[in-house]
Image: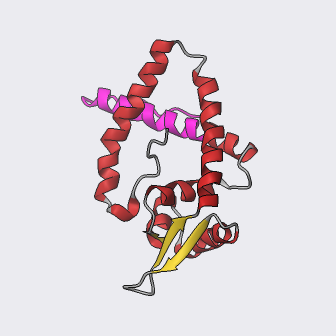
Amino acid sequence: MQLLSPASNSRGVDEGCANAVLDTVPMVMRVIRQHLRRHRSGLTVPQFRTLCNVSTASGLSLSAVADFIGLSLPAMSRLVDGLVEKKLLTRKTCDEDRRHVRLAITPRGEATLREARDLARRHLAEALARLPASQRAGVEATMQILRGLFSGEVAEEGTDAAPAVAAKK
């Protein structure tokens, strides 16, 4: 992965930190994706992310999930069709506006999501176990800081765009 060039202006420290996040998060996500592809129980990464997102707030609209995942409405609708067919999600037409579709995760979807998350968590734990305890604590503290920092931005988008990174321990 090509690292972004460090900033050379007066905001160099802030931009250096931003570059570190931009360089590291995609690499970590690539490892998670690779692991999910090997052990995903038939889920694609977008399907996994969709289940995560819907599990955080039942009743999300199809458009909100499409926005979160980064897919067009027709592509999201096809993805959701597959999850409904596998009985991992349900679709319900909104009573107030029949043009809107609300999504909910099924018990089978929760079990599938839990299994995929457990496999990913175990893989990450094995990788992180190679770090000294103080560095592992630092990684965990940093993740909590980042969650606190960015969860407000996600919340500003509205409840339909709730983050899919809710802590599930």
Question: Magenta segment, principal secondary structure?
Answer: helix
Q: Is residue 157 magenta?
A: no
Residue 143 in the image, given as x and y percentages of width and height: 42, 33
99 in relation to 119, above or below: below
Q: Is residue 8 magenta?
A: yes
Residue found at the very far bottom of the displayed protein: 98
Q: Residue at x 31, y 26 (%)?
A: 13
Q: Residue at x 48, y 65 (%)?
A: 65
Residue 63 in the image, given as x and y percentages of width and height: 46, 71
Q: Over which residues does the magenta segment extend? A: 1-30
Quadrant in which residue 74 is drawn: bottom right
160 displayed left or right of 77: left
44 in relation to 65, above or below: above
- Report if residue 46 is visible in the image: no
168 in relation to 49, above or below: above
Residue found at the very far front of the displayed protein: 107
Quadrant in which residue 149 is drawn: top left
